[in-house]
Image (cartoon, rainbow, N blue to C red):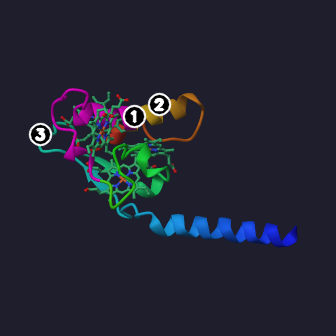
Amino acid sequence: MKKIFAMLVAVAFLAAAGFVYAMPKAPAEAIVVKSAKMKKPPVTFEHSKHKFDCAKCHHKWDHKGEPKGCESCHKDKKDGKKLSIKDAAHKTCRGCHRGMKKAGKKTGPTKCSACHKK
Ligand code: HEC
Ligand code: HEC
Ligand code: HEC
Ligand code: HEC
């Protein structure tokens, strides 16, 4: 019984290690999210403050290679089901912050000027 348990632990450990090594790393430095035609001040995004599943934001990521920036698909204007970059960002970013705030959890900003910092 002990042996089986030790084996299970080893297998679980190896699986976890393999999973970690197969994961691409999120950029360590802050990213300034801005598009060409922006009127509002740009938004600073830090992966280090967002340790969630990558696919939570990079929702079209194939789990291979590096995820692509949102603007490679979301443009200035809505295109069919593809939201504009503004709506896509607001739904993902502000949506999560608002939801967590409502639930009484520590989260990111929900006010315009707290994200669009001059
Ligand atoms: C809370 C949302 C969120 C999470 C979680 C997240 N990212 Fe990101 N990531 C972004 C945003 C926003 C950008 C900037 C996109 C842009 O500039 O269009 C970005 C950019 C990137 C880029 C640069 C893409 C480019 O071409 O500029 C890489 C690589 C990346 N993320 C990898 C990861 C990995 C790996 C994980 C999981 C460990 C992860 N991200 C988790 C939101 C997130
Ligand atoms: C490879 C293309 C691609 C990339 C990259 C991409 N999206 Fe999308 N996104 C789409 C498409 C296509 C849709 C339309 C709905 C669907 O097919 O899921 C969509 C829909 C959405 C929606 C609406 C989902 C809903 O519930 O209606 C949000 C929000 C969103 N994207 C946010 C983002 C954010 C934030 C990023 C960057 C972190 C991003 N997307 C990167 C293609 C992409
Ligand atoms: C799944 C939930 C979730 C999503 C999606 C998300 N955030 Fe956050 N955000 C958080 C949480 C939780 C914190 C608080 C982290 C902390 O203080 O450690 C945070 C903190 C922040 C902060 C404040 C950082 C600081 O210096 O204190 C900014 C700015 C921010 N988020 C911007 C964004 C932007 C821009 C996006 C979209 C690209 C985004 N967030 C998407 C949950 C989310
Ligand atoms: C949680 C962070 C966050 C909050 C809060 C937020 N935004 Fe944004 N907003 C973003 C991100 C990220 C983008 C995408 C930037 C880009 O265009 O690449 C964006 C894009 C935009 C754009 C399109 C680009 C431009 O400047 O023309 C407008 C307009 C905008 N936001 C206005 C607002 C207003 C008004 C509010 C308050 C009601 C607000 N935002 C609140 C993160 C935020």
Q: Nearer the viewer, residue 66 or 27?
A: 66
The vertical placement of 64 against 57, above or below, is below
The image quadrant where one finds the C terminus is top left
Residue 94 placement: quadrant? top left
Lateral position of residue 100 relative to residue 8, left or right: left
Element under disc 2? helix
Comes first in the chain, label 2 or label 3: 3
Left or right of 104 in this view: 113: left
Please name whichever residue, 20 or 98, is drawn nearer the observer in this view of the structure. Answer: 20
Residue on which the image places disc 3: 37
Residue type at the position of mark 3? Lys
User: Within 8 Å: ligand 4 and the Cβ of disc 3?
Assistant: yes
What residue would you read off at disc 1?
Answer: 94
Give the quarter the ligand 2 occupies. Answer: top left
- Tell me what residue is drawn at x 59 percent, y 65 percent: 16
List x then y, in percent, for residue 101: 53, 32
Query: What is the spatial separation of the Cα atoms under label 2 and label 3, in whole angstroms?
Result: 26 Å
Residue numbers of the magenta segment? 68-92
Position above or below: 51 against 95: below
Per the image, is 88 magenta? yes
- The answer to whether the residues at label 2 and label 3 have Cβ atoms under 8 Å apart is no
Ligand 4 lies under 8 Å from the Cβ of mark 2? no
Viewer-proximal residue among 3 and 84: 3
Q: CA distance from mark 1 to mark 3?
A: 21 Å
Out of 69 and 50, give the one closest to the viewer.
69
Instruction: Tell me residue 72's x, y (percent).
Output: 20, 47
Amino acid type assigned to the residue bearing label 1 in the image: Arg
Are the residues flagged by discs 2 and 1 in contact, CB closer than 8 Å?
yes
Q: Is mark 1 within 8 Å of ligand 4?
A: yes
Q: What residue is disc 2 on?
A: 98
Q: Who's the residue at 38% across and 36% down the image?
A: 92
From mark 2 to mark 1, how far is it between C-alphas?
A: 6 Å
